[in-house]
Image: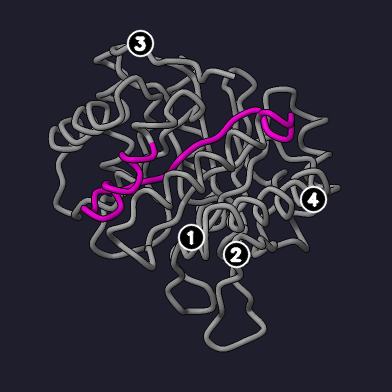
């Protein structure tokens, strides 16, 4: 299956919300959903680490659930999809930390990692009635080995798509040299089966202006040619990153320039106490 290719300078109505990572009790049904957007939830995270040890130990592609399953259960996934025909649900793989420890992409071999990942994720995706996967590895056990990362992730996405297990896949890089080298190598070989680039623009500095944000967006569109690149911001109270206000203003500017393919927000857990103000505004912008 070929990914939909973006037309440079084209607005779209794609909205994505990461959910479940902060364990704050948020439910799918808490988030206001605009029926005029294409709405994706991304459960955060599935990890190929064992938390039975301290520190957690890598499991070579054997993925387990590491999100708030009490509130984001298989029944909850089915219910939100039944209630909203425009909603799909994916799971993000990797993340930055587990129980306070940094986690790394760590494959014993391509063949063994892919075999384990396909098996464990197929079971999880079918159990939770999911539609896609997101790749969010942020650290790497061998920072110079782009080939292993490329083949593990590329073959995983291809196999899950070929088997009809998922209908879409996204990647979530950010502006770090090692991260970009990994994801751009993956993109160079497997871009045709990667549907969205959920670029973490909020990782740029807190002093970033709207004009600079738009410049960064243009740079990433060039770095992932032909990709559906989503603008992004976070609602979590984190110092040193782009504010939600600046991020949303940048989305408005991108919309006015006919460049806004979509928006993703990190994350619903943080937005719960804020009344989902930015989710409501972002979806209204995309639907307008």
Cα gap from disc 3 to disc 1, whole angstroms: 30 Å
Q: Earlier in the sequence, mark 3 or mark 4?
A: 3
Left of 21 or right of it: where is 167?
A: right
Quadrant housing residue 73 = bottom right
Q: Residue at the location (35% across, 10% down)?
A: 7
- In terms of sequence position, does the residue under pointer 4 or pointer 2 come before the other? 2
Disc 4 marks which residue? 123
User: Which residue is depicted at the point 27% across and 47% down?
Assistant: 181
Mark-to-mark CA distance, 1 and 2: 10 Å
Q: Which residue is mark 2?
A: 48
Q: Residue furthest bottom?
A: 54
| Magenta part of the chain | 162-186
Disc 3 versus disc 2: nearer the observer: 2
Query: Relative to the observer, which residue lies in front, 45 or 139?
Result: 139
Look at mark 1 in the image and give the residue it sits on. Answer: 95
* Left or right of 115, for residue 103: left
Q: CA distance from mark 3 to mark 4?
A: 35 Å
* Residue at the extreme right: 75
Tag 1 and tag 4, C-beta contact below 8 Å:
no
In the rendered image, residue 47, in percent from the top left (x then y), is placed at 59, 63
Cα separation, mark 1 vs mark 4, equals: 20 Å
Image quadrant of residue 161? top right
Say whether disc 3 or disc 1 marks the residue closer to the N-terminus. Answer: 3
The numbered disc on residue 7 is: 3
Q: Which element type, helix, strand or loop, lies under badge 4? A: helix
Position of residue 1 relative to residue 42, above or below, is above
Q: Is residue 185 magenta?
A: yes
What's the distance in space between the residues labelled 4 and 2, CA to CA? 14 Å
243 sits to left or right of 153: left
């Amino acid at each position: 299956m070929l990914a939909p290719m973006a037309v440079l300078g084209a607005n779209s109505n794609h909205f994505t919300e990461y959910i479940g990572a902060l364990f704050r009790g948020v439910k799918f049904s808490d988030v206001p959903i605009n029926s005029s957007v294409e709405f994706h939830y991304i459960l955060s995270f599935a990890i190929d680490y064992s938390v039975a040890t301290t520190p957690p130990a890598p499991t070579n592609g054997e993925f387990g659930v590491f999100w708030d399953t009490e509130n984001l259960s298989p029944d909850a996934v089915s219910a939100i999809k039944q209630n909203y025909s425009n909603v799909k649900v994916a799971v993000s793989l990797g993340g930055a930390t587990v129980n306070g420890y940094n986690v790394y992409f760590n494959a014993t071999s391509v063949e063994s990692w892919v075999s384990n990942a396909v098996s464990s994720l197929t079971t999880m995706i079918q159990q939770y009635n999911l539609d896609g996967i997101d790749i969010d590895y942020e650290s790497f056990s061998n920072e110079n080995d782009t080939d292993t990362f490329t083949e593990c992730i590329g073959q995983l996405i291809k196999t899950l798509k070929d088997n009809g297990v998922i209908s879409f896949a996204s990647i979530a890089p950010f502006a770090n040299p090692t991260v970009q080298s990994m994801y751009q190598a993956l993109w160079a070989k497997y871009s045709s089966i990667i549907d969205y680039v959920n670029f973490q623009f909020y990782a740029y500095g807190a002093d970033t202006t709207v004009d600079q944000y738009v410049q960064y967006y243009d740079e990433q569109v060039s770095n992932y040619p032909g990709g559906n690149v989503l603008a992004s911001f976070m609602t979590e109270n984190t110092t040193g990153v782009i504010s939600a206000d600046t991020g949303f203003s940048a989305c408005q500017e991108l919309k006015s320039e006919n460049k806004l393919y979509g928006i993703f927000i990190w994350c619903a857990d943080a937005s719960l106490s804020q009344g989902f103000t930015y989710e409501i505004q972002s979806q209204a912008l995309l639907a307008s």
